[in-house]
Amino acid sequence: MAQKSAEPITSIEHIPSSEHGKGFPPFDPTTFASQFVWLVLVFGALYLLMSRIALPRIGAIMDSRRQSVEGDLAEAKSLKDSSDAAIAAYEKALADARGRAQALANETREKFAAEAEAARKELDAALNTRLTEAEQAIATRRTAAMANVHDIAVETAAAIVERLTGNAPAKPDVAKAVAGTLKS
Amino acid sequence: MDPIHQFEIKNLFVLTRIGGHEIAFTNSALYMVIALAVISALMIGATTSRALVPGRMQSIAEISYEFIANTLRQSAGSEGMKFFPLVFTLFMFILTVNMLGLIPYTFTVTSHIIITVSLALLVFLTVIVYGFKKNGLRFFKLFVPSGIPIVILPLVTFIEVLSFISRPISHSVRLFANMLAGHITLKVFAGFVTMLGAAGFFGWMGAVLPLGLTVALTALELLVAFLQAYVFAILTCIYLNDAIHPGH
């Protein structure tokens, strides 16, 4: 472009003939040798740099990353497993303790229930004994009282007969008569 | 304004002459060396720390590595991984010189057919040499597809041979023509902008359209620059797959 700026270009068609004479640059064989040599040099150098240094290094970086990620995942898994095991152990201990507590509570409850039952039975027995005794006492008293009623009735009857008739009746007769009356 | 001017080879200094051929350090060679420096800085410079958690540049280097490794593994299988450095170097070299060529005032190395033909022949010869070394004469099975009636077999074989031989041509011309045409188009549209701009106010108004097109074309050329490098690499993978597994 530099040498062309001296003569101003008015249209695309008007190109200096010196430029035209060279032909189409990509098909100019005089430049092929230089380009080819430099392509071989640069491409060869690039190939060596990539295959010897860059690609193995990036491969190693990605391998080590994959390994460390896998290692971390494995460690996380083992930690999770151990925490799961701890949780399971804790829950088992809790269940055992709960079971033992239940058993203990049941045992205690039964023991106390049995004791209470025994005490109640004892008390019942004592009360029954006393009830029987009292009933016997009442029966004795009643018999005694009934006997006294008989005596009193005989004496009263004798006294009434004596007052009415003036004669004291014979005691066995009166007793017989009272007994007959009481029976009827 | 000459859209062809950008492809001129200029000798920066002449090194030697071999058999009447002038060997010079040219602008093309300069951009190859720049590409070498850029790729080395990315792939070696950015990975020196070998960080477990990569930084930005190391991420780019690792993504490039994985991208090409996956492409190669998918098309040529795990056996193809022995060609990984070759495919990777091809891809990075073509991609970098394509991208460098999109910077204004730079030179596009891949816009010269000698470069793309050399690279395509490198792949072609690698396929032939490795194909015969690994498979011996069974490599010829590549040209004889199985399950074809014997009547049309000679015709099919002829077509297969022809397509095999034309591979380096299509392989190289595709890249060369894409880069050449893209840069000529860009130059022509950018040239319209300056030509119209010189024609006063209405020229300025008219220049808006080619300017917008130049911006859009630049975006398209960025895509093409990547895509052509990728296409070159994936075709290399497919051709290498033929050398590794010649049976269809």
Image (cartoon, grey):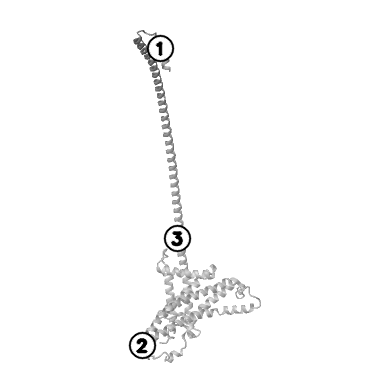
Q: Secondary structure at mark 1?
A: helix
Label 1 sits on what residue type? Ala
**Which label belongs to residue A13?**
none
Left or right: where does residue B175 sit relative to residue A139? right
* Callout 3 touching callout 2 (CB < 8 Å): no
Label 3 sits on what residue type? Val
Which marked residue is nearer to the observer: mark 3 or mark 1?
1
Query: Residue tagged by mark 2?
Result: B203
The subunit carrying tag 3 is A
The subunit carrying tag 1 is A
**Where is residue B57 drawn, in percent x and y?**
41, 69
Dot 3 or dot 1: first in sequence order is 3
Query: Residue tagged by mark 3?
Result: A69
Query: Residue tagged by mark 1?
Result: A175
Q: Quadrant of the C terminus of chain B?
A: bottom right
Residues beneath discs 3 and 1 located on the same chain: yes
Query: Compared with residue A156, is residue A131 higher up or lower down, i.e. above or below?
Result: below
**Where is residue A156 drawn, in percent x and y?**
36, 13
